[in-house]
């Protein structure tokens, strides 16, 4: 469903090029498009939330596995990194 640009509708209505009924019809088309866009965005946001939740769950499981490995192997959970000494120039 094609619609006029909202600014064009307002301009045409203000200049008497379209009737109030036509302006209302175009406005309803715009409202419908806005609802469709909003529904699509909500569905996409919901899918992203589910994906983030799944990733968080996977990360938590991986952290538990790492902690178990650290306990069983006796390795320190965080090894300090020693920077390499600068070579004399």
Image (tube, helix red, strand yellow):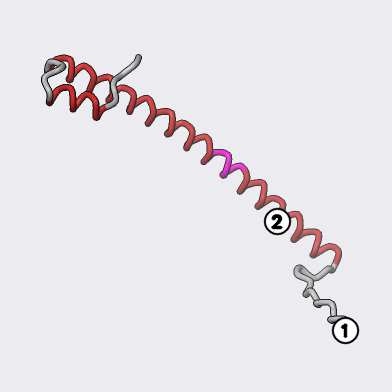
| 80 relative to 6, above or below | below
Taking depth in this image into account, of 59 and 33 the one nearest to the observer is: 33
**Which quadrant of the figure contains the C terminus?**
bottom right
Taken as a whole, is the magenta stretch helix, strand or loop? Answer: helix
Give residue 74's position: percent from left, percent from top: 84, 68
Determine whether label 2 and label 1 are within 8 Å by CB.
no
Residue 52 magenta: yes
The residue tagged 2 is 63
Q: Which stretch is magenta?
A: 49-54
- What residue is shown with label 1? 89
| Residue that sits furthest to the right in the current view | 88
Q: Position of residue 19 (x, y in %)?
A: 12, 15
Q: Position of residue 46 (x, y in %)?
A: 48, 36
Image height check: is 59 above or below 68?
Answer: above
Residue drawn at point x = 26 percent, y = 27 percent: 6
Give the secondary structure at mark 1. loop
Q: Is residue 35 above or below residue 22?
A: below
């Amino acid at each position: 469903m094609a619609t006029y640009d909202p600014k064009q509708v307002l301009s045409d209505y203000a200049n008497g090029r379209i009737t109030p009924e036509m302006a209302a019809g175009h406005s309803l088309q715009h409202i419908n498009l806005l609802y469709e866009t909003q529904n699509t965005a909500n569905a996409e946001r919901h899918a992203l939330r589910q994906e983030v939740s799944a990733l968080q769950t996977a990360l938590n499981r991986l952290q538990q596995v790492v902690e178990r490995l650290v306990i069983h192997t006796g390795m320190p959970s965080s090894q300090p990194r020693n920077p390499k000494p600068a070579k004399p120039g």
